[in-house]
Image (cartoon, rainbow, N blue to C red):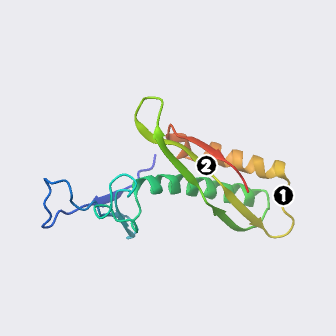
Amino acid sequence: MSEYFATIEWKRGTQNFLDRRYSRAHEWQFQGGVAIPASSSPHIVPIPMSVADNVDPEEAFVASISSCHMLFFLDFASRKKLIVDQYTDKAVGTLAVGPNGKQMITEVVLKPEVTFLGERPSLEVLKELHHQSHEACFIANSVLTDVRVESV
């Protein structure tokens, strides 16, 4: 068993809290020392209470699924002696009403574009690598969200 830690910190400062117009800007701190400026999404809480330049939880959710899938893809490709030169995924998450009537990220579509050194593997091999990666991804296995891969 492994455990993972994050510290999420928000401070009111001198803001009036009761009018609900306080800043949603906060910081995510990770064990390795990285600190990431975060905020609510401007799609949910309007600017200036949200900070559009900061990462929001919904974006981070999509990124974590994409990153997990990519890391497994790279591993499985290396095991097949395929050399990946670049992997770019322009993943898209959709916030909608789920089957339980609550807002949720209902789907995440991964759109990886992979370039290889030498001959590109067959479509069947690519599909299998993505299938294996999806099956192995801890994050995708942990959520109700429909995660699909549309390989470019």
Circle count: 2
Disc 2 marks a residue whose amino acid type is Val
Q: Relative to 116, is 52 on the left or the right?
A: left
Dot label at residue 16: none
Q: Is residue 82 above or below residue 97?
A: below
Q: Residue furthest top?
A: 100
Instruction: Tell which of 68 and 109 is nearer to you.
Output: 109
Instruction: Tell which of 36 and 20 is nearer to you.
Output: 20
Residue 104: where, in percent of width, then height?
44, 41
Q: Relative to 112, is 14 on the left or the right?
A: left
Eye-nearest disc, 2 or 1: 2
Residue 52: where, in percent of width, then height?
39, 65
Q: Secondary structure at mark 1?
A: loop
| Among numbered discs 2 and 1, the one appearing first in the sequence | 2
Instruction: Tell which of 84 and 76 is nearer to you.
Output: 84
Q: Are marks 2 and 1 in contact (CB under 8 Å)?
A: no
Crowding near the residue tagged with mark 2, few <14, some 14–19, many ≥20 C-alpha atoms within 10 Å: many
**Residue at horizontal 39%, vertical 66%?**
54
Q: Relative to 144, is 89 on the left or the right?
A: right
**Residue at horizontal 15%, vertical 67%?**
13
Question: Where is the C terminus found, in terms of image quarters?
Answer: bottom right
Residue wearing tag 2: 109
Crowding near the residue tagged with mark 1, few <14, some 14–19, many ≥20 C-alpha atoms within 10 Å: few
Residue 59: where, in percent of width, then height?
47, 56
**Residue at horizontal 83%, vertical 48%?**
124
Q: Secondary structure at mark 2?
A: strand
Res 29 quadrant in image: bottom left
Residue wearing tag 1: 121
**Residue at horizontal 21%, vertical 58%?**
21
Residue 114: where, in percent of width, then height?
73, 62
| Mark 2 to mark 1 CA distance (whole Å) | 22 Å
Disc 1 marks a residue whose amino acid type is Pro
